[in-house]
Image (cartoon, grey):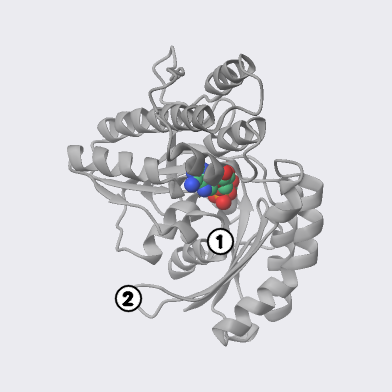
Amino acid sequence: MLVLGIESSCDETAAAVVESSGGRPLIRSNVVASQIDIHRHFGGVVPELASRNHLKMILPVIEEALTRAGVGLGELSGIAVTQGPGLIGSLLVGFNVAKSLSLASGVPYRAVSHLESHIFAAMLESELEFPFLGLVVSGGHSSILWLEKLGQYITLARTRDDAVGEAFDKIAKFLRLGYPGGPAIEKTALSGNPRSFSFPRAVMKDRSLDFSYSGLKTAVILETRKHSLPLPPSRLSDLAASFQEAAVDMIISRVEGALRLKGTNQLVVSGGVACNTRLRERLAELSRSLGVRLLLPSPHLCTDNGAMVAMSGLLYLQAGMTSPLDLNAYPIEAFHSADKKN
Ligand code: KG4
Ligand code: ZN
């Protein structure tokens, strides 16, 4: 099977071809056109600019993915595309192109969720059987899912305000560290002391596993305002390290709670923030102590890419599940909409 995956939910226009001939899927091509340089100036993603640039890049990126894979459109077994969640204007670009390609070529298409795709990225590198726990930590999401079987998921936790990557980006912007904020904070934190500042770790009163990053963000901003900017490099590093440690602590406590709740021994963690070295270390420690098998995709498969979308599509197409052409994209988490009309 040869599947083309198309991703345009945020600020990366991405397409990839993944092949499966029984064993581990093979990534034949994986093309990502990043818009980082466009949004850097604003310190965050500007939705209207993102949509316009997807429009400009989507066809060249798809053509490049097919060329690098040495595959013609008609040779594909299927086309997979991100239906949501994400920025609606951005999603519509990839979604409508995928449906048009399907209609024109007769190749079936499958709408997939951005969150399941982040998690299924792990299957590009490792064997993985349902059920398992999945954590997606990115610029738009902080969600813990219980993946019972293909298309059947329970959301155990989501964020009540900012996503964790969004908090990294906003704090980096405030501290004038550059964009995207995650890698900038991680680099600045390297020489800092994570115990210099005791920032709050949010705990939900109702004992839910939901995330909240607004309190931490406010605490860092209030602390910074006590000093004149720019901060001396050592203070800046201490602040970045203390923020990062608090952000990671909140992830670890929720994941531990969810692992205990489900009594599972398989955990997949993905999304852009899963590139963070400190988070990867802490997850490895937690998994070791609980005897859990941890699957962390390589960093280039944790950030938005087309291969993870193709991987999701492969699973659905192998199960004979295609999508009707009258579906629409959706901006917020809604796992079952891809199957509503099947
Ligand atoms: O998954 P992704 O590429 O896009 C979304 O679906 O949102 O994630 C991008 C996010 C950004 O917020 C970025 O700052 C964050 O991932 N990120 C990191 C690191 N690398 C990327 N956050 C913390 N540490 C990193 N090393
Ligand atoms: Zn993402």
Which mark sits nearer the N-terminus, 2 or 1?
2
- Between 74 and 243, the residue placed more toward the observer is 243
- Between 21 and 161, the residue placed more toward the observer is 161
Dot 2: few (<14), some (14–19), or many (≥20) neighbours within 10 Å? few
Asked which secondary structure carries label 2, the reply is loop
Q: Is residue 139 visible?
A: no
Dot 1: few (<14), some (14–19), or many (≥20) neighbours within 10 Å? many
Quarter of the C terminus within the rendering: bottom right
Q: Residue drawn at (34%, 28%), measured in percent from left and top?
A: 253
Q: Is residue 300 visible?
A: yes
Image quadrant of residue 144? Answer: top left
Q: Residue drawn at (60%, 20%), measured in percent from left and top?
A: 224
> Which residue carries the number 2 mark?
23
Q: Residue drawn at (38%, 41%), measured in percent from left and top?
A: 278
Image position of 334 with respect to 210: above or below: below
Q: Residue type at mark 2?
A: Gly
Q: Is mark 2 within 8 Å of ligand 2?
A: no
Q: Which mark is residue 305?
A: 1
Image position of 280 with respect to 236: above or below: below
User: Residue 304: x percent and y percent?
Assistant: 56, 56
Image quadrant of residue 162? Answer: top right
User: Residue 128: x percent and y percent?
Assistant: 31, 59
